[in-house]
Image (cartoon, grey):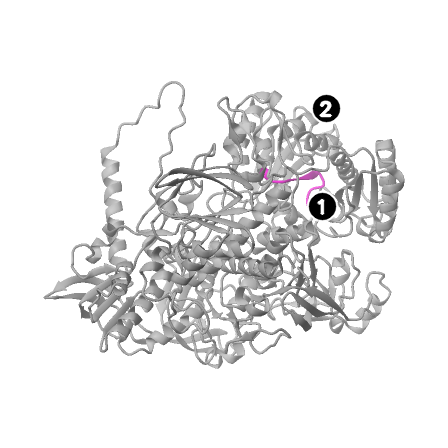
Amino acid sequence: MATKIGVYFDQQNIGGGLDVQALADGVSKKWGDFAPVVKVYPVLANAEADIQADIEAQGLDGVLVCGCSPRYDWNLYQFPGIQVERVNLREQCVLAYKNPDGSAAPAGAAPELLVAMAQDYVNMGVVKLQKSTLPEGAAVEGVKRVLVLGGGWTGLHAALEVAKTGYEVVIVEKSATMGGHVQNIPTATPLSAPWTEPQESGLEAKIAQVKSNKLITIYTSSTIARLEGQPGEFTATIATAKGEEQVQVGAVVLSTGWTPLAGKYLEPMGYGKLPGVVTAGEFGKMLREGKMDAKRVAFVLDTTLAEEAAKAQAAAAAEAAAEEKPEAAAPAEGEAETPAFVKQDLESIKHLGYSNSVSGVAALRLANAVCDKFDGAQVFILYKDMVVQGLLERYYKHAQNRLGIMMTKADVTDIARSGDALKVSCANTLLGMDFDVEVDMVVLPTGIVPTTAKDAVVQFAYRQGPDFPDLDLFDGFTDSNYICFPYETRRTGVYAAGCVRQPMTMDACAEDAAGAALKAIQCIEAATRGVAVHPRSGDLSYPIFNFVRCTQCKRCTEECPFGALDDDEKGTPKPNPARCRRCGTCFGACPERVISFANYNIDQIGSMIREVVVPKDFQTEGPRILILACENDAYPALDMAAMRRKSWSPYARVIPVRCLGSVNAIWVSDAMSKGFDGVMLLGCKYGDDYQCHFVKGSEICNRRKENIAETLNRLGVQPERVEQLEVAIDEYDKVPDMIDGFVARIVDMGPNPFKGM
Amino acid sequence: MSNSILVVGGGFSGLTAAIEAAELGYDVYIVEKTPFLGGRVAQLNKYFPKLCPPSCGLEIQFQRIRKNPRIKFFTQAEVVGLTGQKGDYTVKVRISPRYTAPQNVDFGLLASTLEGEVCSEFEFGLGKRKALYRSMPFAFPGRYVLDPAALSKTDAVRLAGNQFINLNEQPRTIELGVGAIVVATGWKPYDVTNLTNLGAGSVKNCITNMQMERLASPCGPTGGHIVRPADGRAPKRVAFVQCAGSRDQNHLNFCSYICCMASLKQSLYVAEQYPDAEITIFYIDLRTPGRYMNVLEKVKASPNVRFIKGKVADVQDDPATGNPVLTVEDAVRGEKLTLAYDLVVLATGMQPTLSGETLPLPVSVDEDGFICGGEEAGIFAAGCARMPLDVMRSAQSGTAAALKAVQTVKGR
C-alpha cells in the first residue's frame, strides 16, 4: 500500500477551463497527510527532476500524475521503486466532455459537471494508489531445459535451435527413428533461394547433428505419459519401452506433426478400390524405395469427389440421427462425478482441403521426381486451384516449363479402371474441352491430420484436463487464434510448431521451429524472473490466495482461461503462477473475494467506485454511470474517440480493468449501493472470432452477468441497469454513442432505487 | 563486443523480432524510417480471416514496448552506415527532426486550423493531411510530427511562437553498438503506374487493394465508407482483379501470398456495407492456404459473389459513366468478356522495400529485391523483406529471426 504520495498536475495537458489549482487544493484538503506533495506544473514533462527530488525529500512511495492518458508519455514518469499511477484527465475527462444535452462546453470556466468529473477521477487515482502495492514476482528456479515433443523435421530444427542458444533439450519421439514423414520423401521442395529447384532435405545430417549434440537427449519409441507442474519447473513423465522416466523441463515445444487422413475419406476417388490409386505420401515412399515404375501418372489435386461424398454421407447420417430420435438420456442422479476424459476425434474430410498448400507443392515435387526417373514420362497435375504461394511460385513456373509435366485446372469427375490403366475424367479444363487421361497411377493428396486431432498428446496433469481446450475451434490443430501472436496456446509454456499447428511446407516448418524455440526459452526466463509472459509480459504481479476464507467452490479453477489453477481433493485451489497470464479472471470468479494481486484487487476497484461522488438528486443532477472498461481494447478506443473529438455523457465514470473476466459481481453491488444508476461493462468481442486477449474473459463476464441480473432482480433493481457491450478497438467512432445510448436507457428507467440509502 | 540487437524496420515483423528478443532479456534498438511504428499493417482496416482490427494487436505490441526498458526505438530514422563485424558492429543512424516537443502534446485543434494541406502518403493519395499530423488515431509514438514543407506561410508564422514546436530542430546522427541485426524492411505496394494494361493508375474508380483498405477503415479518408473516389457514389458492382503485377515475369516474378485472401476479405467489407452489391473476383488460382479455405467457402456461399478464372487483360475508363471497363478472357469457357463495373479493385502485389533501394548493410538481395543470405554476418532477414508473407507468418518469421540474433549475441 502506498503510504505517502505526490500528486502532480500537468496543466499543459488538462485545459477545458478547469481550475487546476483548485483541483490541487481539493486533493490537499481531502487527502491531507497521505498526499503531502500536491503540485501544479505548466509543463510537467520538464519536472522529472523535481518529482525525483520530492520523492527523496518527502519519502514518497507513490506518484500520481494527472494529465494525458497513460498510453502516452509512459517513458517520462518512471521512478525506480515508486508506484506511479496516471489520471487520464485529458482524453477521458476534458476532451470527452459534453453537456448533458449534447452541446459542447462553453468557452471559459469549466462547467460544474466537468469539475465534478475531474475531481472524481483524481480521487479515484489517489485511492487506487492507496490500495496498491509494488508487486514482487513469484519466481521459480527455472530449469534450462526444453522438452521437444516429436522428432520430425520441425522437432529436429527446434532441438538444434534450442541447443544453439545454450539450453538443454529432451526430444521425445514416438517412433523408433527420427525424421518423421521427411524420411519418406525423395527430395525436399526448394528450401531457400532461388526457390526454383528441389533440394536435398539433408535429413540424415540433421539427425546426426542432433545425435551428436551434447545438450540434446533423445528418447525414441517414447511418448509423454504426463506433464505436470508449471513453466520453469515442469515434470514430464516419459513412457519408454523400458518403463516410465521423469525429467524436469522448463518449457515445451510441441512438434508432434501429423498423421495421414484415413483412407476411407479417399474411397470415392478410387483409393483402396482401384489398384494404382495411392496417396502422395505413399507415392513418395515408393519412389524412395525404388518401387515406383509408372511412367504415366496423374496427380489429382481436385478432391471435390471425396468432399461431395463426405458431405452427402454427413447429411444422410444427420437425417438418420434425426429420425431415430434417441431417448433423452436421463441426467445421472446424485453426485455429479467429473466424467473421465474422452478424446473427441476431430479428424474429418476438411483436413484434405486444409492441406492444399502442402499438397500443391508435393505434387510438383513428386511430378519432377517421376520425370527425373523416366525419360518420356507423362505426368498430369489436375487441380482446382494451384496453391503454391509466395516465392514457391518460381518452383511452380519452373515445373510448368518442364517437358513431360502437363498441368491444368480440371474438375475431376471420375476415376475408373480402363483396361490395365486408370482413366481420369476431366471437365471444365483450360484446354477448351472435357477429356480423359489414361495413366498407370493416380496420386491423391495426403490429408494432413494434426496429431492433436486424434490424441491428447501432451497429457497435461491439469485440473482442466489433459488436452488443449480450443482444439475444436481449429479442427484439431494446436493453433493460436491470434493472428498477431501465432504461438499462443491456452497452456502457458507449451508452444506448437510445424504441421501440428498448421499445414505448412518444410521451409516454413523450419522457421516455425525457431520461433517456437524462442518462445519456450523466453518462457523459462520469464518464470525464472517471476514475470508474466504474453500479453502482460513482464508483469510481476500474480494472484495471491487467502485460503482461510476459501470455500472450495472451484469457480476459479474452472474459469481460468489458461488452466493455471489445479486443486487438491477438497477443491482448494493450487496456484501455478508461472502458468498464469495475470488477467484476473480468477478473482472475478471468486464469490468470497479471497484472490488479489498486489497492485490490482477487489478492494482497490471497489474503493475507487465508492470514491465517486454520486449526487442524491437524479432529476436535477443526473444519473451516474459506471463503466468498467477492458484496458486493452475498450480503453484505447475511448482515448481515440476523445482524441477525435467525439464526446460522451458527462455522467459516466470509466475504470479500466485488466480484462472483463476480472470483473467481480461485488463491484456491481458496490456501484449500486453507492447509488450509481447503471453499470456498463465494456469489453472485447467474444465467440469463435473472439478478440479477448485472455481468450475467455469477456465471454465469462457475460455469463456471470446473468447471475448478477438475478441478484439484482431479487433486490428489486432492474437487471437492465447492468449491460455488457462488445467493442472493438477500432470502434472509436461508435463507442461514444454506445455510452450515450446506455445513459439514455438509464435516464428512462429513472433513479437506482438504492440511491441515497 | 555487444549483446545488443538492431532491428531495421518497425513494422509487424520488426516489432515482433524486437519485442521477443527484449523479453528474452536482450537490449534492442528499432530503427524505423517513418514517424510511427506499425508499418503496413497500420494501414489495414481488418485482418483475415477473423476480420479483426490490426490496431488491436498493435496496441498489445505497443504496451509491451512501453513496459520494457530494454527496447529503444527511433522513428524518422535510417541506417546510414555500418562498421565492424558480426558481434561487434557500430551502426550509424540518421534521425530526421520531428520539430515537436519530446512529450505528448495534443495539437489536434491547432492542426485542424492549419491552412496547408498535402496529399497523404498514408492514405495512398485518397486523402489529405495537414503539416502537423498523426497518420492514424492509434499512432505510436503518439506525438505529432511536423512536415514543414506542408506549411503555408501563415501557418509557419502561427507556429513560430509555439513553445512546443521547434522549427530549428536539426537532423542528428547517432551511433549504436550492436552484435546482430534483424532486417525487417518489409514491402511496398507494387507501383500501379507500371501496370499499363490495367490503366496505370489513371482509370477513375479503379483503385488498389491497399487503397481499398483505407477506404474501408474507420480512420480513413471516407470514415470507412466504401465509395467511388471520383464521385463519392456507392458502388453496386465491384470487381477484384487478382494478380495485378504478381505472378508476372514482367512485373513481380512471384506470388504475393496475401492478395487472394485480401480480396476475399475485401469482398466481405463490400458485402457488409452493400448487401446487394454484385461482386466479381477475377483470378488465376484462388490461393487460400490451410484453414483459410473456410473464408473461401464463406464467400462462395454468398449469391452475390461470382468467381471467374481469367486474367484481366485491360482496364479502361468509360468517360460517360466513370465506370471502369474490364476486358478479360474466361479461361474455362474460353470467352472474351467486356464488363463494366462501378468500382474496380486491383489486387496489386507486394514488392520488397529493398527492390530499387539499398541498405548500407552487407546483405544481398535477389532479382526481385528479397534478401537472401547475410546470416554469416549476423544479419537476419525477417518478414516480407525475406519473402511475401501474411501477418501471422510475418510474426513467426520475426520471432525466428529474433532467436537467430540472440544466438549471435549470446554471451558476448
For marks 1 and 2 on the same chain, the one whose residue lies earlier in the sequence: 1
Q: Which mark is residue A756?
A: 2
Q: Residue lying at the far right in this picture: please name it.
A: A57
Q: Mark 2: give few (<14), some (14-19) or many (20+) Cα within 10 Å.
A: few
Query: Residue type at mark 2?
Result: Gly
Q: Is residue A322 visible?
A: yes
Between disc 1 and disc 2, the foreground one is: 1
Query: Residue type at mark 1?
Result: Gln
Q: Which mark is residue A92?
A: 1
Q: SS for tag 1?
A: helix
Task: Residue A106 in the image: state x and y as whole percent.
Answer: 80, 48
Taking the image as shown, residue A159 lies to the left or right of residue A610, namely: left
> Is residue A745 or residue A686 the one in the foreground?
A686
Q: Chain of mark 2?
A: A
Q: Is residue B228 visible?
A: no
Q: Quadrant of the C terminus of chain B?
A: bottom right
Q: Magenta part of the protein: which range?
A: A648-660
Q: Residue at x 77, y 72 (%)?
A: B152
Q: Residue at x 59, y 50 (%)?
A: A731
Q: Quadrant of residue B334?
A: bottom left
Is residue A44 found inside the magenta-colored segment of the image? Answer: no
> Is residue A458 or residue B65 the one in the foreground?
A458
